[in-house]
Amino acid sequence: MSRNVIPFPSGPGPHDAAAARWLARRDAGLTPAEQAEFVAWLAADPAHEAAWHAVDAAWRAFDTPRDHGLADGMVLALASRRRQRRQKRTFVLWSAGLAAAACLAVVFLLRPAPTPPPLAVAPTPSHPVSPISSTAPAPVAPPVAQPADPTLALVIKAPRQTLEDGTVVELNGDAEIAVHYMAEKRSVRLIRGEALFTVAKNPARPFIVSTGLADVQAVGTAFAVKLGAQNVDVLVTEGRVAVDRTAPAASAPREFSTLVDAGNLFVMPRSAAPGEKLGRLEPLAPAEVNRRTVWRAPRLELSATPLRDAVTALNRENTVRLRLSDPALAELRLSGVFRADDAEGFARSLQSYGVQAERRGDEIVLSRR
Amino acid sequence: MDDSAEQSRWFAAELQPHEPALRAYLRSQFPDVHDVDDIVQESYVRVLKARQTGPIASAKAYLFTTARNAALSILRRPRIFSEKPVTDFAVQSVPEDKPNAADIVTLRQETAILLDAIDALPDRCREIFILRKLQGVSQKDIAARLGLSEQTVQVQIARGAQKCADYLRRHGVSHP
């Protein structure tokens, strides 16, 4: 993998602007004559060359995200930052613009604090928006309709990675883990948040997640570990895991004290004293297991987004396709968070806004009632 | 300027015609060197600089020798990350192609800084920069997509590149 070794000079220089202009010209494509001019410019003065190398190295540094498949995530993050800035800025404007936008139908959903991501939020059938006075307090959430600026339909997915042994890790929100694979065991430390592991089977090389409070061992199974403020939770969705207190020195083989089977939640209070029981076992209904792991599903965030764009975004994610039979529907604006992998559910939630959904084979046709 | 124009003419007449042969030579002799563009450009500059200090008998021979030396020096350059001891690494938002551990730590920090650098750009400039660098759209296509002249896009790219370089410099992005 090529790394960017960036030999930056100490500060900005007089040739930076010229170097940047050359960079942009070169990026657009130089004719042979222009290339001759460029090379001559470079050779004319070592300062030209230094300025060029600095701007060129920086420019290349911005290739890293695409080289590593991180660019799409960055685009989303930048769009979301911009949106947040705008929401703050346009809050007052919004109430003014509302009259003009009176025809908008807006689905309002509750959205928790910006991070961690809002999940499992079922679309609540809602209030047509009532005007908010410009003296209203704090210009923060809920997501505000932005009639002046049609916004993106964002599909957001939990980060997901396949580790070298085939184990798949999914991270909820801002979760973070550290991976340390050794010959005799696969060790992962959960640093923050919640992660779900679908572990590749290998009895000779146990897979152990440590949380500081407890270690969770799996052989071939799927489970989520969540670091909460009060408790550490282990939710097993497949197979079985073994849980034990984190050992002071983890070298010797040891017995794990508690076995947790699929469909169970093991809750370990952080306050438990060393002599006390490590935690309690709670059997969960399948629906409850689904609810607790719904953060794995991609979600669609809309913010005064035209239905047309929402449909385009959903159709990219699903085999069942939505189609608008009435062009007027295209401009219907929606806000809220939906599951991006459930086109039917999305269509159903539109019904309370006078939109009729009809399934025809692999297609759901939306029309006005 | 006269000097520079003379250099340009000499370059176009004496060096540029050898470029296809030079590239073919580099690709065949140094298949592990990926940055052929860089070596070619770097070699041009070195030859032009050498010419400022005295006449060059065979521009072609000089060019090829310079390029060969540049390629060799790249091959000798130590790999930056391979020798670092690895204890653990974080994997948030890491893609599927399994880069090595130490890379990932750096990658995460680097990505965060890149994100901030782009975020700090003025609106129009940021929009264009994102299309170009994160979405890989060419300047020409950006112009068409946004209904701007190619000149305008180029100006914004230059501006974005300079500002981002500045941002990285101020935030000390450089590797040992």
Image (tube, rainbow, N blue to C red):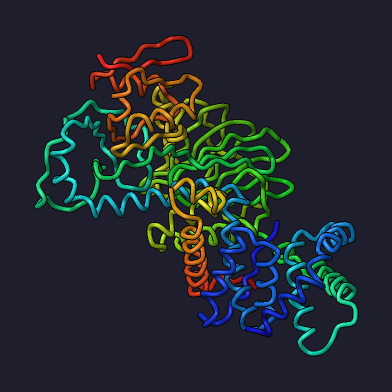
Q: Which of the 4 quarters of the picture holds residue A125? A: top left
Residue at horizontal 24 percent and vertical 46 percent from the top:
A141
Residue at horizontal 39 percent and vertical 25 percent from the top:
A288
Please determine whether, in this image, residue A122 is positioned above or below residue A232.
Answer: above
Instruction: Classify residue A163 as left or right of residue A110.
Output: right
In what quadrant of the picture does the C terminus of chain A appear?
Answer: top left
Nearest to the observer: residue B162 or residue A153: B162
**Residue A320 place in picture, x, y as percent:** 47, 19
Please determine whether, in this image, residue B26 is positioned above or below residue A102.
Answer: below
* Total numbered circles: 0
In what quadrant of the picture does the N terminus of chain A appear?
Answer: bottom right
**Residue B12 place in picture, x, y as percent:** 76, 70
Q: Is residue A246 visible?
A: no
Please determine whether, in this image, residue A225 is positioned above or below residue B167.
Answer: above
Instruction: Classify residue B71 as left or right of residue B45.
Output: right
Q: Is residue A59 visible?
A: yes
Instruction: Classify residue B103 as left or right of residue A343.
Output: right
Residue at horizontal 78 percent and vertical 67 percent from the top:
B16
Nearest to the observer: residue A358 or residue A246: A358
Q: Residue furthest top?
A: A360
Instruction: Classify residue A326 as left or right of residue B56.
Output: left
**Residue A227 place in picture, x, y as percent:** 43, 46
**Residue B10 place in picture, x, y as percent:** 77, 76
Residue at horizontal 25 percent and vertical 31 percent from the top:
A107
Nearest to the observer: residue B104 or residue A226: B104
Q: Which of the 4 quarters of the picture holds residue A323? A: top left
